[in-house]
Amino acid sequence: MLPVIYSEEFLDHKTGKFHPEKPERLIAIAKGLKKSAFAEQIEWLAPTPAADRPTLLSCLAKAHTATYISKIKAIASSGGGYLDTDTPVSPRSHDVALLAVSAWLDGVDTVLTRANPAFVLARPPGHHAESDTGMGFCLFSNAAIAALYALEQPGVNRVAILDWDVHHGNGTQAIVQTHPQIAYCSLHQYPCYPGTGKASERGFHDNVLNLPVPPGSDIAVYQPLLEKKVVPFLANFQPDLLIVSAGYDANADDPLASINLQPKDFGLFTEHCLQLTRKILFGLEGGYDFSTLSQSVTATIERCLV
Ligand SMILES: [Zn+2]
């Protein structure tokens, strides 16, 4: 069985009709999984409600400033607004973003307990959110918060994050790069939004590996990077948990970038992760072409079930 942590409440973060990061993304993925050949092997789990997680706010406070967290709450309670031109906050966004963080933490618990992969199907995404700024469709830095939470669990001394979203996870990197117990590795189009992620950015403890790829790249560019750079970097770090910031906007059909991966390529990505460990938490980041997004998540999960 493969746990997928999902709630229809994640659809209540409203971004507007013309925004690419819309609720229909999750609907398309859930639909694809439910009609897949392995649908019966998926265990749908509801996230722990924020109110039932007394430590949730202290987890959040490890990654974000109190001022920033209050700001999101205030904008939502006042009826909504924008953090930047492409990052809306709707009336329920604060609560939904908190539930998304809780879902990522549930994912950590599930993976550590079962020593098997789990997938968090939540939104809003998180990897662009910095400690005091939301941006790029992201409110709270889900992957970084999950990594910091994991380090508090028994037997977890090192956590690695692999970010294969087509955009660099500036927020995740900024939050974790000062922590010697967390490694961050990103494959991303460069140049592209948000403009960070140069190969020269190595973290405060040589714990960051950025692998920028040029527009037009396909699996022929990615595969050697996976084999010769990503896997050795992660293997050398010997993580007790691997968190994947699983964005699927490097697909050829994605409207937001210019990389030419195919959905099946994410099965190959997943296979490389599984060579390292079965303790893998996948959490959704970007991916804006509904069809290839759904197929890619299906390819990721299918590979975990093989
Ligand atoms: Zn992205």
Image: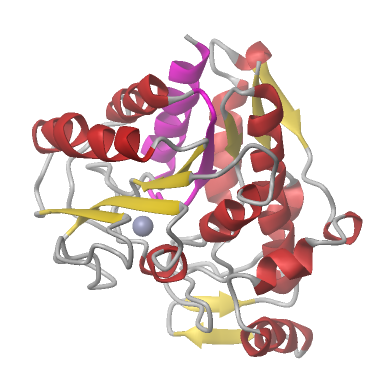
Q: Residue at x 10, y 44 (%)?
A: 217
**Residue 262 shows in the view:** yes
Q: Quadrant of the N terminus?
A: top right
Magenta range is 278-305
Horizontal side of 296 relative to 73 (left or right) equals left
**Residue 299 highlighted magenta (yes or no):** yes
The picture places residue 100, in percent across and down from the top left corner, at 67, 56
Q: Of 218 and 13, which appears nearest the observer?
A: 218
Using the rendered view, name the quadrant where residue 69 is placed.
bottom right
Q: Residue at x 46, y 85 (%)?
A: 84
The picture places residue 90, in percent across and down from the top left corner, at 67, 76
Q: Of 81 and 268, which appears nearest the observer?
A: 268
Against 202, is 230 above or below? Answer: above
Q: Of 41 and 158, which appears nearest the observer?
A: 158
Horizontal side of 235 relative to 78 (left or right) equals left
**Residue 245 shows in the view:** no
Against 237, is 63 above or below? Answer: below
Using the rendered view, name the quadrant where residue 37 is placed.
top right
**Residue 217 highlighted magenta (yes or no):** no
Horizontal side of 111 relative to 168 (left or right) equals right
**Which quarter of the rendered image does ligand 1 occupy?**
bottom left
The picture places residue 227, in percent across and down from the top left corner, at 18, 29
